[in-house]
Image: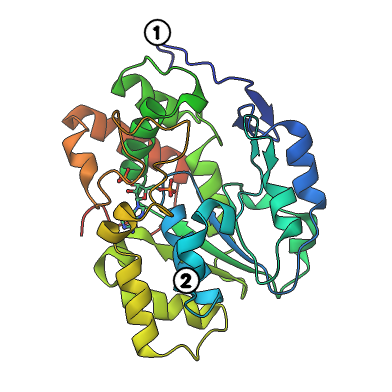
Amino acid sequence: QDHGYRHVLPGEHVYDGVLFFGYSPPDVLDAVKEFKVRDDDVFVVSYPKAGTTWLQEILWLVMNDGDFDGATKTPVYFRSPFLEFKDLVLNEVGIDLAIAMRSPRVIKSHLPFRMMPKQSLYLLSLQFVVVFRNPKDVCVSYYNFYKASSSFGEFTGTWRDFLIMFLTGRVDHGSWFDFTLSWWERRTEPNVYIVFYEDLKKDLKGEIRKIADFVGKNDLSDELLEKIATHCSFSSMRKNPMTNHEDVYSINKQVSPFLRKGIAGDWKNQFSVSQNEDFDAVYKQKMGDVEIPFQYEV
Ligand code: A3P
């Protein structure tokens, strides 16, 4: 439904039905399709705010056999490039970072499956670790990120405005429903592994073991997995300058830090009863019979 507030993203455009802003311009999205993948690439795929950074740090350490020394030297967003992102201020393109990088690469993307590099359709050795998080918490996290990040232009709307934007896909990277359905449809492909944010909250080490097995790193010791889990806890990632994004020029941490709360169920502090009912109604309408076992609290 229409509402009074209209937030215009800087450089916004629609590509293949998905709303993007200037940091993912059409030429970059074209180049993503032609991007040359390697056999041992791992993609971390997620809708924004689902726990992407968490998985990037986990997978980078898993793929690099627990190179904690390397992890202290370079911020996670340089170790694991963001495929469809062009930093207009730093003049860096995710694709270029990826091309220059040695293997194994851990590449981040928020794109629905159809927009992935064309080669991923037939290169089955390529692995996709897809992070899902219940959409109410995603929406609250995204709202706080919109308020704190100058990249989206000054967001002056209310929570209610943002909720409507989210439900109608009028946010950067478009509709959560579209993204989620595109990957859920592929969940039985042997090279697709879906991990739930809430499961990571419940049993981080156990989930890291499953992720490591999926990417073929089944030889990692229990002790190493324990160390990775400790390194990737919310409190230690929040303290760690290589993961907490405190040096990212566009994020005002006084408004909301990048690692904000890191919990499941925060939506209950934000949604009114009627907003929750509206959300459930839209969810039902968009998802139809598709049943994804999201957990709204842990
Ligand atoms: P909140 O805003 O709810 O705190 P993304 O990396 O996809 O942008 O997602 C960011 C969200 O993941 C934030 O959620 C952030 O706090 C959360 N997050 C990042 N690292 C985490 C960790 N180690 N444990 C729990 N949550 C984490």
The answer to which of 221 and 195 lies nearer the viewer is 221
Q: Quadrant of the N terminus?
A: top left
Image spot of residue 288 (x, y percent): 45, 46
Image spot of residue 101 (x, y percent): 70, 62
Colouring mode (rainbow / by chain / secondary structure / one colour): rainbow
Q: Are marks 2 and 1 in contact (CB under 8 Å)?
A: no
Image spot of residue 92 (x, y percent): 68, 40
Q: Quadrant of the C terminus?
A: bottom left
User: Can residue 106 be seen in this snapshot?
Assistant: yes
The numbered mark at residue 192 is none
Q: Secondary structure at mark 1?
A: loop
The answer to which of 22 and 2 lies nearer the viewer is 22
Q: Residue at x 41, y 50 (%)?
A: 50
In the displayed structure, 13 sits above or below 240; it is: above
Number of numbered labels in the structure image = 2
Q: Amino acid at mark 1?
A: Gly
Cα distance, mark 2 to mark 1? 51 Å
- Ligand 1 within 8 angstroms of badge 2 C-beta: no
Residue that carries the numbered disc 1 in the rendered image: 4
Please give left or right for residue 50 compared with residue 103 in the image: left
Dot 1 alpha-carbon crowd within 10 angstroms: few under 14, some 14 to 19, many 20 or more:
few
Dot 2 or dot 1, earlier in sequence = 1
The answer to which of 51 and 19 lies nearer the viewer is 51
Residue that carries the numbered disc 2 in the rendered image: 69
In the displayed structure, 97 sits above or below 191; it is: above
User: Can residue 290 be seen in this snapshot?
Assistant: no
